[in-house]
């Protein structure tokens, strides 16, 4: 997929009634994969289901259920789970539209949270973006992803092995853990961007070139993309950690405050990197300008030296019968000596003025 594509076509939505689920995103050919993890402090089961109907019995169980859906391109699956879990049609529309900005909506019976999961492609080093939608209910969390593959494996391992608090806490803590995993991965992305910035900075110092400028603009584009994903997230976490949502328990709020701090760190680091790249562009332009000035200075000095020499040569190139030293055998050599003396004097003068 184009890694930093900021907007996709939304023309398919034009003229449709509000709440009409239409998939907007990159073309996906694979099947939708559904994985269910159901647990409490003493009980755990995990399975991959073939039909969405197999998830329906978990709606009213006393245990915590995590339903993860990889792929939001099949309308019938989204509509079925929306109908079973009483998800509003407008929310289903937002789930299938992968151009949503990070946001949160409190619909009393459940919370709807949209996040941007970022990671770096190991093949080309580009930043990949994927929308993750969370529906947090009284005893369940439903996560919708564009495709298979995420940063949630450590959470799955903690659930399987009963490590940490996740098995003892409710769905609000699970939602926190998913958000925390996404935010923590931003630091991984930023670290790789920082390494590239250091490499470009070294190239800028040793040998500034148009290719270096191109790399700087590419990095600025990546940071703009990252900023677009992170800035709205601060508001989402802020709403959650203020405790205004009834589904978020007080025991979870302190963990959300930690995520909020991490979000602020990501934002500040992003801004620092953007400022560094702006200064690098200024340094590149100054370097090119200085290099140009040096070239112009050398050419000016050469031209200045040859101006009097050209003047002397032009005088002796006139077609007059009478001219001093015109018929003197040593006149040619004398003129060359005069030219050399004039040139040497001008070089000494330039050197004393520290122009060269």
Image (spheres, rainbow, N blue to C red):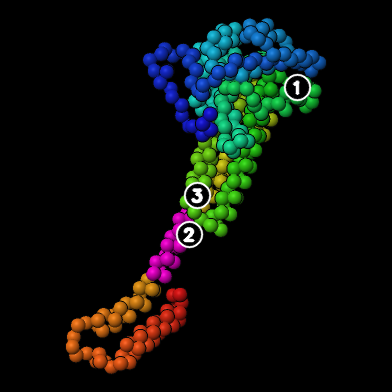
Q: Quadrant of residue 83?
A: top right
Q: Residue 202, image x and y in percent?
A: 58, 54
| Residue 123 drawn at (x, y percent) | 61, 35
How far separated are the C-alphas under marks 1 and 3? 48 Å
User: Which label's residue is closer to the chain start, 1 or 3?
Assistant: 1
Q: From the viewer's side, name the closer residue of 63 and 243.
A: 63
Q: Label 3 to label 2, Cα distance in Å?
A: 14 Å
Task: Give the residue at x 66% y 7%.
Answer: 54
Q: Which element is circle 2 on?
A: helix
Camera-side mark, 3 or 2: 3
What number is the disc on residue 189?
none
- Residue at 37 percent across and 88 percent down: it is 337
Determine crowd level at label 1: few under 14, some 14-19, many 20+ residues with C-alpha closer than 10 A.
many
- Which numbered marker is on residue 159? 1
Mark found first going from the N terminus, 3 or 2: 3
Helix, strand or loop for disc 1 = helix
- Comparing 340 with 66, the one in front is 340
From the viewer's perspective, tell me whether residue 96 is left or right of residue 155. left
**Would you name the residue on which mark 2 appears?**
287
Q: Which mark is residue 211?
A: 3
- In the rendered view, tell whether residue 113 sits above or below residue 17: below
Q: Which residues are magenta?
A: 281-299
In this rendered view, identify the residue nearer to me: 295 or 164: 295
């Amino acid at each position: 997929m184009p890694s930093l594509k900021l907007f996709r076509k939304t023309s398919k939505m034009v003229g449709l009634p509000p709440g009409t689920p239409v998939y907007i995103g990159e073309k996906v050919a694979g099947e939708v994969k559904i994985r269910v993890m159901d647990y409490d402090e003493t009980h755990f089961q995990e399975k991959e289901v073939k039909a969405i109907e197999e998830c329906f019995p978990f709606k009213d169980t006393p245990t915590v259920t995590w339903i993860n859906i990889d792929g939001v391109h099949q309308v019938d699956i989204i509509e079925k789970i929306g109908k079973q879990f009483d998800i509003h049609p407008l929310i289903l529309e937002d789930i299938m539209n992968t151009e949503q900005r990070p946001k949160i909506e409190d619909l009393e019976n459940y919370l709807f949270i949209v996040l941007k999961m970022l990671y770096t492609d190991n093949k080309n080093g580009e930043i990949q973006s994927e929308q993750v939608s969370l529906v947090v209910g009284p005893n369940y969390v439903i996560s919708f992803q564009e495709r298979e593959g995420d940063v949630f494996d450590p959470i799955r391992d903690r659930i399987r092995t009963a490590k940490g608090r996740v098995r003892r806490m409710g769905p609000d803590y699970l939602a926190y853990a998913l958000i925390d995993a996404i935010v923590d991965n931003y630091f991984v992305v930023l670290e790789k961007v920082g390494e590239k910035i250091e490499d470009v900075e070294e190239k800028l110092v040793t040998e500034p070139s148009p290719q270096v400028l191109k790399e700087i603009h590419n990095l600025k584009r990546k940071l703009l993309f990252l900023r677009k994903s992170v800035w709205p997230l601060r508001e989402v976490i802020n709403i959650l950690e203020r405790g205004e949502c009834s589904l978020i328990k007080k025991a979870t709020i302190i963990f959300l405050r930690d995520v909020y701090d991490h979000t602020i760190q990501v934002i500040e680091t992003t801004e620092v990197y953007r400022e560094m790249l702006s200064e690098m562009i200024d340094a590149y332009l100054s370097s090119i300008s200085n290099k140009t000035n040096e070239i112009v200075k050398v050419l000016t000095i050469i031209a200045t030296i040859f101006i009097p020499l050209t003047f002397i040569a032009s005088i002796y190139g006139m077609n007059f019968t009478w001219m001093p030293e015109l018929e003197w055998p040593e006149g040619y050599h004398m003129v060359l000596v005069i030219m050399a003396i004039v040139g040497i004097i001008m070089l000494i003068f330039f050197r004393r003025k520290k122009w060269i």
